[in-house]
Image (tube, grey):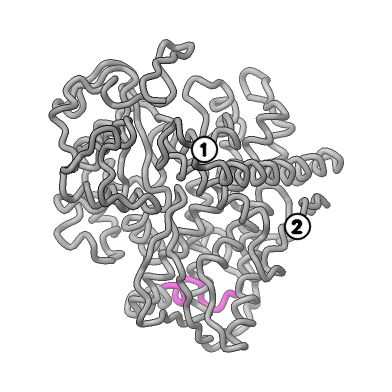
Amino acid sequence: MAGTTETMGTGLPRGFRSAEQGWPELHRIPHPPRRLPLLGDVLGADRHRPLQDSMRFARELGPVFRRRAFGKEFVFVWGSRFVADLADESRFAKHVGLGVANLRPLAGDGLFTAYNHEPNWQLAHDVLAPGFGREAMEGYHGMMLAVTGRLTDHWDRQLAAGRTVDVPGDMTRLTLETIARTGFGHDFGSFERERPHPFVTAMVGTLSYAQQLNSVPGPLAPLLLRAAARRNAADMAYLNRTVDGLVAARRRSGGGEGDLLDRMLATAHPETGERLSAENVRKQVITFLVAGHETTSGALSFALYHLARHPEIAARARAEVDRVWGDTERPAYDRIAKLRYVRRVLDESLRLWPTAPAFAREARQDTVLAGEHPMRRGAWAMVLTPMLHREPEVWGEDAERFDPDRFTAPAVRARPPHVFKPFGTGARACIGRQFALHEATLVLGLLLRRYDLSADPGYRLTVAERLTLMPEGLRLRLERRPRRPEARTPGGADTRLHRTGATPPS
């Protein structure tokens, strides 16, 4: 709540802190016009698209601005000079606030939602980091190929029936199966269902509820969101039951094949010998299942939208796939990183619409942001990543234009650091970013090689917000490209699936 000054063991304040508490010269920071007493900057606000609302105000108010809603004041930052200063790990740290803090009843001290002082974050990070190293990634590669094969089987059936494909829905199926199988040896059967798996429905419900909480006055939330709160409680209970069943099945089986779940259950910290508690294992599994597929599905969906809208870019990317992979049906692990132009397509998609579109930073000590704005210890700011990625001084006056060549090696070297942040920053940046990038590059390569993609000319990009971003209502028409010859040497990894036998509750 606004006005609280609870402190933690380090002496740093935690919980929601309205900006008046941490910004001594707050009056110097601009805010929207027509501010109303008590209510704040709510005139013309869109409670269903708060991120895009804030982007609109950012364009009007500049690189540092503030908004007030229901007695709470928020500072937003997007200018690259200020974001670079916030990236200084010696003076700033991750701040768990707004929608992220609203997920703590579900994810607790999981890697994404842990407060900086909670010891399980460092313990889990140190135990799980090897699960994203090269050796582990090579082991996941075959499963990624297998899951993508199920996607293309599904798309082939849709094509044969003369139907368009539901891009966000199918990318969600793909990425959920990928993280569930590679990380936890579990099969949700997503492509055998007409409707989204109940896990996805429950997950979307909890993310949407977390965002809703930010648009309702705190004291009124129990009254105005009573029905939503009941649904959220049911959603969380379902997610917890699903994960408990998955973990219990693994314990009964005596272990898997060294995946993330095995690491959570059996690996001790290399220095302290400490292990994750049963409760924390549940939180970490939920964190990986949710965060490990929701953002990647959005990134793939936006990339496919741009490829369908720009056939010349799709043709160039497809030519690279044909050149690098040749007639190999199952590209080997080390061939994925050689798709440099496909990766640039992905990076440019993440530039325009980073699917985790904001991150918050708090001051470790009294300081002055970029030499201009004093901040007290514990003061925090929200970084608007899509605006950082559109700053004209960095990206040019055509920053709204989709152009993968912004990510050629010379162009990247010419830009200052800390201007591209789709995975957050610092020690608390996304632990699975290399997993996500490998998966997404592989999937785009396989889809480009197999299909020509086209969008409805009347479709206009609409971005849905549920803490993460997703193109809404995007359907694509497919045309099958000529089949390539079967490869004599597959080049892929073993695709055997260790099945836990866990049955998700229905």
- Res 420 visible: yes
Magenta-drawn stretch contains 321: yes
Q: Magenta span has 203?
A: no
In the image: residue 288, left or right of residue 50: right
For the residue marked with disc 2, what is the amino acid? Leu
Q: Main secondary structure of the magenta part?
A: helix
105 or 260: nearer the viewer: 105
- Which residue is under mark 2? 497
Report whether 304 appears left or right of 385: right
The magenta stretch is 320-329
Q: What residue lies at 50% left-to-right and 55% top-to-bottom? A: 296
Q: Quadrant of the N terminus?
A: top left
Q: Quadrant of residue 177?
A: bottom right
Q: Residues within 10 Å of mark 2 (few under 14, many from 20)?
A: some
Question: Where is residue 490 drawn, in percent x and y?
Answer: 65, 71
> In this view of the protein, which residue sits in the foreground, 325 or 12?
12
Split into 4 quadrants, where in the image is the C terminus?
A: bottom right
SS state under label 2: loop
Q: Say whether residue 419 is left or right of residue 100.
A: left
Pointer 2 and pointer 1: residues touching (CB < 8 Å)?
no
Label annotation for residue 223: 1
Where is residue 77? Give x, y as percent: 25, 38
Residue occupying the point 61% across, 20% down:
271
Q: Residue at x 82, y 38 (%)?
A: 251
Q: Which mark is residue 390?
A: none
Give the SS element for disc 1: helix
User: Is 92 located above or below residue 352 in the figure?
Assistant: above
